[in-house]
Amino acid sequence: MDKRRIEQYKNRLLEKQEELRHLVVKSEQDGREADEAATQDIADKAANSYAKEFLFHQSDDQRRILQLVEEALHRIAKGDFGSCVACEKGVQKKRLEAVPWARHCIGCQEKQEQGLL
Ligand SMILES: [Zn+2]
């Protein structure tokens, strides 16, 4: 992969990393505020725990993607960005365009989703 393209992916990854860091911090704050707003009313309590559950899963996803973004930046630094971590073939360009932090090529991703990898 040529340097200019790697540089473009790197910038996109750095932006995403920044965005996710903010979101993770915000979700944690919202979770704490939901805690502080707990009331006596049972319906409110149910709504509150539902909101907390939602925020928890949301920040979980954000954290997971943040981890993948950081791994991708690490691969750029090591010079093996764009290769599938399983079969080491190049990850398809279209796939990297859509998901620059993708770890697997399409074939390996499908295998992983089926639990074969
Ligand atoms: Zn692969």
Image (tube, rainbow, N blue to C red):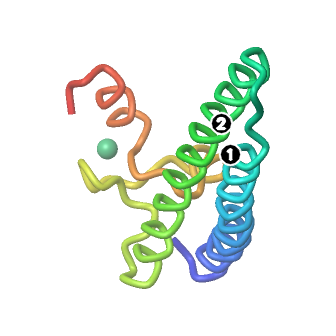
Q: Amino acid at mark 1?
A: Asp
Q: Nearer the viewer, residue 76 or 49?
A: 49
Q: Amino acid at mark 2?
A: Lys
The quadrant in which residue 8 appears is: bottom right
Looking at this view, name the residue that lies furthest to the front.
40
Q: Residues within 10 Å of mark 2 (few under 14, many from 20)?
A: many
Q: Does residue 22 appear to the left or right of 111 in the view shown? A: right
Q: Nearer the viewer, residue 101 or 83?
A: 101
Q: Secondary structure at mark 1?
A: helix
Q: For the point 25% across and 24% down, which residue is it?
A: 115
Residue receiving disc 2: 52
Which quadrant, please, contains the C terminus?
A: top left
Residue at 65% from the left image edge and 32% from the top image edge: 54
Total numbered labels placed on residues in the image: 2
The percent coordinates of residue 98 (x first, y second) are: 66, 46
Q: Position of residue 86 (x, y in %)?
A: 25, 49
- What percent of the width, then of the height, locates residue 33? 76, 52
Disc 1 under 8 Å from ligand 1? The reply is no
Question: To which residue does mark 1 refer?
Answer: 35
Q: Quadrant of residue 5?
A: bottom right
Do the numbered discs 1 and 2 sit on residues whose CB atoms are within 8 Å?
Answer: yes
Q: CA distance from mark 1 to mark 2?
A: 8 Å
Tell me if 8 is positioned left or right of 111 in this view.
right
Ligand 1 quadrant assignment: top left
**For the residues carrying marks 1 and 2, which lies nearer the camera in this image?**
1
